[in-house]
Amino acid sequence: MDKLAKDVGGPIDLLIQNAGYFMEGQETLENLNDKEELKQIDICALGPLRVTSALYKNGLLKNGKVLIITSQAGSVEWRFTQNQNEGGDYGHHMSRAACNIAAALMSEELKQAKIPVTLVHPGFNRTEMTSKYAEIWEKEGAVDPSVGAKRVLHEVPTIFMWNAVHHCPKCPAFGHRWPLYVYVRYIAVPLNSFRDLCISDRELS
């Protein structure tokens, strides 16, 4: 990580962290995979923590913003809907919950340095990582990664110290926002109250 910071060389205005890993198989209590669980937590939760720490310690985040791509997979409340009567995918959900908590804590530590930390959930994307759920892409409104990226970039100009929050789009399949809860700065209410990020490509362009 220190080498990464030295290689960067100059200050960073915007740090977007998009680490993600999902084991190929379906994980249940009958086939737990400790190695894969730890790998997911290492990449999705500890990854953003390590990168932010290295850049901050080397003075590269001064006057910058930290944006972390997360997922509704880290929501405890939503598991009782999306994983109802099934459970499973333990490593994936634990890694995203840990990522969210890490970001919340980083936002508090970096507050005095006036570096906002924001978690953004860009929605369900049609990627190689999510291809094992391709049969529900249409049902759950999965989008091309280019659309997910536009949703993220659309939020960048709105990130300030006073409003760094956890953003989440509306779920097209159910017509309402995923009931994630905001862990980041100053907010502790359901995300239903925030504006819809699922705006059209025309609005995003």
Image (cartoon, rainbow, N blue to C red):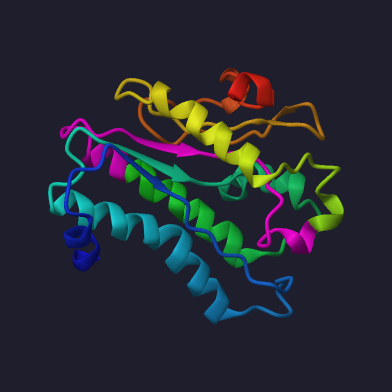
> What's the residue at 38%, 22% (across, down)?
163
Q: Looking at the image, is 103 positioned above or below residue 94?
A: above
> What's the residue at 59%, 62% (across, down)?
92
Picture quadrant of residue 31: bottom right
What is the x, y in percent for residue 176?
Answer: 73, 26
Q: Looking at the image, is 16 positioned above or below residue 23?
A: above
Left or right, 161 with reference to 31: left
Q: Main SS of the magenta segment?
A: loop
What is the x, y in percent for residue 85?
Answer: 81, 56
Magenta-colored stretch includes residue 156: no
What is the x, y in percent for residue 141?
Answer: 78, 39
Residue 188 shows in the view: no
Quadrant for the C terminus, please: top right
Residue 8 shows in the view: yes
Picture quadrant of residue 14: top left
> What's the residue at 68%, 48% (across, down)?
79
Relative depth, front residue between 47 and 8: 8
Q: Looking at the image, is 80 positioned above or below residue 185?
A: below
What is the x, y in percent for residue 47?
Answer: 38, 61
Quadrant for the N terminus, please: bottom left
Left or right, 129 with reference to 9: right
Q: How many marks?
A: 0
> What's the residue at 25%, 63% (across, down)?
4
Picture quadrant of residue 108: top left
Magenta-colored stretch includes residue 125: yes
Range of magenta residues:
106-133
Relative depth, front residue between 88 and 130: 130
Relative depth, front residue between 7 and 191: 7
Relative depth, front residue between 95 and 118: 118
Left or right, 112 with reference to 68: left
